[in-house]
Structure formats: C-alpha cells, structure tokens
Amino acid sequence: MTLSMDRPITRKRWRKSHLRWAGLGVAAIALVVLSVRLATAPPSITVRGDGVAIATVRQATFEDAIPLRGSVVPLETVFLDAVEGGRVERVLVEAGEQVKEGQPILELSNTALQLDVIQREALVIQQINAIFDSRRSVELNQLNNIRTVAEAEWHIKKLRQEGARKATLHAQGYVSAEVNEQVADELVYWEKIRARTNESIAKFDAWKLEEDGKRADQLGKMEDGLKVARSKLDGLIVRAPMSGQLTALDAKPGETKPGGQRLGQVSREGGYKLQADFDEYYVSRVRAGQVASMVVAGKQRKLTVTKVYPEVKNGRVVVDLAIDAGTDLRPGQTLQGKLALGAAEPALVLQSGAFLEESGGASVFVVSADGSYAERRPVRLGRRSSDTIEVLDGLKPDEKVVVSDYSSFKDKTRIDLR
C-alpha cells in the first residue's frame, strides 16, 4: 500500500516542474519577439491631432503668381549728402519746395577747412614770388654774362688790330718784341674769357630749361591742391543736383553735420514708379517685362517690371514697376497685387506651409485613411505660389498631408495622432 501511494506523488511534482520551465521559455520567446519588434519599428512620435496643420491634396487651377507689396516713389531721386562736414549756418530752402539745378539749399561753415584754404593760397603766392625772384636773379646773371662776352669780343677785335700794327712796327724795328708779346698775351686772355663765358651761358640755358620745368610742375601741383581745397570750400554750400522738388531735408541752423551724412533728397517731378520686394526664392523667375496686377484707386491696373535689383537683403529682392503717367498717386502710397510668373493651368496642388523649410519639398507626412497616424513619403513638388504648391508625383487627390513645421520630425518616419 505504501509503495502504491508514493508513485502518484512523485509523478505530480515532475509535471509541475515541467510546466514551470515551459512557461519561462514562452515568456523568454515573447520578450525576444517584443524586443525585435521594438528594434525594427520605424522611428515615430506621438502628437495631438489638433497640434498639426493638415491640408488636402486637390485638383485645381494653379495660379503661377507671387504677391507684391510696394510703395509709390518718384521716378528719379537724387540724395543730398554733406560732401564736407561743418556747422549749419543757413537753411535756404524748406522741404516740399521746388528747386532749380545748382540752387543753394543750405550753407555750412568749417573753420579748419577755411584756414587750410588760406594757408594753401599763401603757400602758392609764396612759391610764385620765389619763382619770380629766382628767375629775376638768374636772368640778371645771364645778362651780365652776355655783357662779358660782348666786352671780350670788343677787346679781341681791338687787340687783333693792335697786334697787326705792332707786328708791322716790330718788323720795321720800331717796337720791341716784348711789346708785341704783351699784346698777344692780352688777346689770349680775352679769348679765354669769351670761351668760358659762352660755355657758362650754354650750361645756364640747359639748366634754366630743366629748372623752369621743375618749378612749373611744382607750381602746378600746388595750384591743383589749391583748386581741390577751394572746391571743398565750395562744397560747404549744398546745392540742388537737379531741378525738382526737395522732398526731404534734415538740417537745422546750429547743427553739426559730419562729412558724408545724408541731408535730404530731390525728386524729379513728372512721374512715379512702384518699388516692391519679393522672396528671394523666386529671383531666378523674375525679369524685366513681366506684368503685375495692382488695385489702384479701386481699379485693377497692369504694371510692368522695369528693373530687378541684384542685391538680396534679409531674404528679399527689390523690383521697380512702371506706372502710367495719368495714374493719380501720391509718394509713399502703398499698393498690393500679384506678379504673374506663368500662365494659370489645371494641376494637382497642395497648400503651402512651414514643412517646406525643413524638408525642402522632398518628402511629406501623409495622413492615414482613419486619421490615426501619418507616414513620411517621398514626393516631387513643382512650382510654388504664395499659398499653393504644384504636386508632380507621390500624392493623389483627396490625400491629406501634414503641412505644419517639421522641425520636430526630422528623424521620424511616422507621426501617431491622438
């Protein structure tokens, strides 16, 4: 009896141990499977459904145009700058008045500049006087040399005549040889004086020619410097660069204006233009001759692009647009409109959004049919307008796309929406 009762008890313990190990094995397998799934699952992020902007892909007419906002400005404007700094002494014309080309607008004073001009004038006068004094001295010396040559030639002529007579008398025995030699020596003396003086005159003429050139060049440079200084002095009178209206003037008597400071502007009357700007993204597609539509005085008008400025400032590019002469406008008036870049035509379009800044339009998050998540999908986008983008490939009509900022989803391929 005892043996028969011991056998069932041993079998029961073995079964419990077997089940325990089997359960642990199943749990381990489940853990491995879960780990693999987590490791291979796509990177995702969970966000609130109302925390993202969603737009629907639709078939519509794509208007290839960009918005423009600009101000009416005079057709030609020239700025007034202080060429030379100084103190404002008198304001001769007020802003808003008409001016003629060359008309004085305001007067500045600059003591340092005025003293500089006076000193330069004194130096030029001093140099001129020195040149005249030097020239007078050398000309007097040259005159003395000429007189010496004339005197030597007179003596030579007389001594030759006297030498001829003395030679005759010496041959007849009336004059001694010493007297004849004395005349000959005196003749040689005056011939040497004449030769040396003529040589001095020739050297002086060459020196005088060179010296006159140097002095003339030096004097010319000083006079040029004086002209520049006088022109600077004349620059203290600010004049109108052209005829027109003095549309701005920032100067009051007693103020000190440094050189180069903007003082105002003169605008030529007779026409205006619209100066507007647009996003630099479109710079390669904007050119002179394109047409923009603007609402002017309650009427739709066509304006033509006349100039595209090459500079890009703060991501914006400036353009000039021509305005009809008969249009009633005021300087500073603001106009809004659109610039056509191409013809309007049917296309698959998507609403523009901040997502373009991060993805560049290479991929978008497409929302699932039940709206519970959105997955990243590569797409190909085309032209852009102010509010829509042309879809070329990767999306179908009625699909929904997340169009808000993607900066938080850079490394994600899925967005769970709750």
Image (tube, helix red, strand yellow):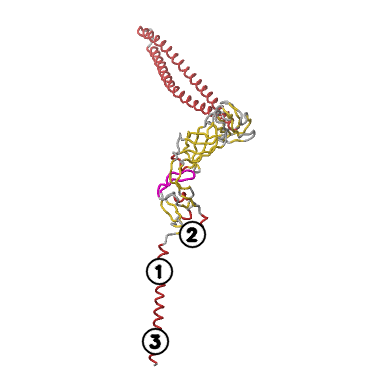
Q: Name the spot of residue 214 as percent of width and height, x first.
A: 46, 26
Residue 304 drawn in magenta: no
Residue matched to label 2: 46
Chain part drawn in magenta: 380-393
Residue 388 drawn in magenta: yes
Residue matched to label 3: 8
Q: Is residue 76 above or below residue 368?
A: above
The secondary element bearing badge 1 is classed as: helix
Residue 13 placement: quadrant: bottom left
Residue 85 placement: quadrant: top right
Spatial separation of the CA atoms under disc 2 and disc 1: 25 Å
Most foreground residue, 254 or 188: 254
Most foreground residue, 406 or 247: 406
Residue type at numbered disc 3:
Pro
Most foreground residue, 287 or 134: 287
Residue type at numbered disc 2:
Thr
Q: Earlier in the sequence, mark 3 or mark 1?
A: 3
Residue type at numbered disc 1:
Val
Q: Earlier in the sequence, mark 2 or mark 1?
A: 1
Spatial separation of the CA atoms under disc 2 and disc 3: 57 Å
Residue matched to label 1: 32
Which of the labelled discs sits on residue 110, or is there none?
none
